[in-house]
């Protein structure tokens, strides 16, 4: 039950717009990052929201998605009209400590969005005793 929950709010993202608006591209890239971190993807779900109007980039719909992990999950939510992303990485440590893998995954995903500013939080969960 014990695990590590990491969150990040990314502002001023300068990554290619496709990472913020294309669910297939974002999903593929996230799966690659999960594998590189040594975590195991077991499922996923991605949704692109409709354009909101206001031009080619200002009104593009964002993407929300999750990669379910054997260890728990990676969740991504994009707001291309704000050049913003929120991230959530949670890993359980049953059987082995996956904290370093979670940290590696978070670093890779944050770096890939090329944010100008990052607000991060970390929470140890499920401490027993």
Image (tube, helix red, strand yellow):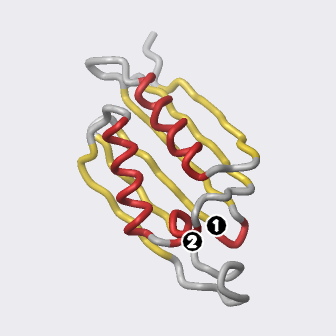
Q: Position of residue 12 (x, y in %)?
A: 74, 56
Q: Nearer the viewer, residue 113 or 73?
A: 113
Q: Nearer the viewer, residue 127 or 103?
A: 103
Q: Is residue 126 left or right of residue 70?
A: right
Q: Is residue 53 left or right of residue 43?
A: right
Residue name at image x 44 percent, y 22 percent: 100
Residue name at image x 44 percent, y 61 percent: 26
Quadrant, the N terminus: top left
- Up-down relation of residue 113 to residue 72 (above or below): below
User: Which residue is under mark 1?
Assistant: 79
Q: Position of residue 73 (x, y in %)?
A: 39, 44
**Would you say the residues marked 2 and 1 are in contact, meaning their CB atoms lie under 8 Å apart?**
yes
Q: Secondary structure at mark 2?
A: loop
Outermost residue toward the front?
16
Q: Which mark is residue 64?
A: none
Residue name at image x 35 percent, y 37 percent: 36
Q: Which mark is residue 62?
A: 2
Q: Position of residue 20 (x, y in %)?
A: 56, 66
Residue name at image x 33 percent, y 49 percent: 68
Quadrant, the C terminus: top left
Q: Is residue 61 left or right of residue 54?
A: left
* Residue 126 sits in quarter: top left
Distance from disc 2 to disc 1, alpha carbons, whole Å, reads 5 Å
Q: Nearer the viewer, residue 24 or 92?
A: 24
Total labels drawn: 2
Q: Residues within 10 Å of mark 2 (few under 14, many from 20)?
A: many
* Residue 93 sits in quarter: top left
């Amino acid at each position: 039950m014990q695990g590590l929950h990491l969150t990040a709010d990314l502002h001023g993202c300068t990554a290619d717009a496709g990472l913020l608006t294309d669910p297939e591209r974002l999903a593929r890239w996230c799966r690659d990052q999960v594998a590189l971190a040594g975590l195991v993807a077991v499922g996923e779900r991605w949704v692109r929201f409709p354009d909101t109007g206001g031009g080619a980039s200002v009104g593009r719909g964002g993407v929300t998605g999750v990669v379910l992990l054997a260890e728990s999950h990676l969740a991504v939510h994009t707001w291309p009209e704000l050049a913003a992303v929120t991230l959530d990485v949670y890993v359980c440590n049953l059987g082995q400590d996956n904290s370093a893998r979670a940290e590696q995954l978070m670093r890779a995903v944050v770096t890939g969005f090329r944010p100008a500013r990052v607000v991060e939080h970390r929470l140890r969960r499920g401490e027993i005793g």
